[in-house]
Image (cartoon, helix red, strand yellow):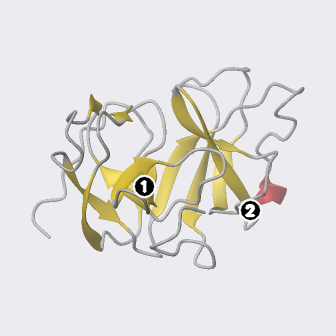
Amino acid sequence: MGDYVENRPSKFSQVSGGKSGSLIGMSASEVIYNSGGKLVHLNTSTGFGEISDDGETPIGWVVLGEQTCSSTAGNTKAWMVTDKTAVFRIPVIYDNSTYTTNYAETLKMETCDVKVSTYQYANLTTTTENGIVIVGGKAAAGTTISPSDGYVDVMLNPNTAIIGTDN
């Protein structure tokens, strides 16, 4: 596997569990932020990894520092953690209107979706893809994504994290 190195100036990263997985080429010009999640899905049309958004089910976590990937698809390669014991910390957004669910202990072992609005975060209000399982967290106090605000600790949902599907 080589060295497991991730530029982590923020708290959003893998926090525990195994690191097994595989190398994945990233889609052209994919943007990776340290202030958000790095959960990816495989685009079955191109065969490359992309940051998962609404409507897409994550299959792993890319170990990359903040960057814009190469403008040539596949030139940026990353270790993708697919270990079912891995726990990842991602931000949560809560605004009490569109995103009506904030983190609470009662959400442990519930599933939710991911969303991208500049940064990838957990959308605790939506459970369409059920791509991640909540195993812990901290309630958000504000209504925007902030490294000092709420987060959830999540695992890949073993029932939905299937390589070879966009959803």
Based on the displayed image, in which of its 4 quarters is residue 100 positioned?
top right
Residue 138 relative to residue 35: left or right: right
**Residue drawn where x is 32% and y is 46% of the image:** 27
Mark seen at residue 15: 1
Q: Earlier in the sequence, mark 1 or mark 2?
A: 1
Based on the displayed image, in which of its 4 quarters is residue 151 positioned?
top right
**Residue drawn where x is 81% and y is 25% of the image:** 95
**Residue drawn where x is 63% and y is 62% of the image:** 131
Judging depth in this view, the residue of 25 and 148 nearest the camera is 25
Q: Eyeballing the image, is 99 above or below 156? A: above
Residue designated by label 2: 108
- Residue type beneath disc 1: Val
* SS for dot 1: strand
Based on the displayed image, in which of its 4 quarters is residue 53 positioned?
top right
- Residue type beneath disc 2: Lys
Q: Eyeballing the image, is 65 above or below 126? A: above
> What is the quadrant of the C terminus in the image?
bottom right
Residue 73 location in percent, x, y?
24, 45
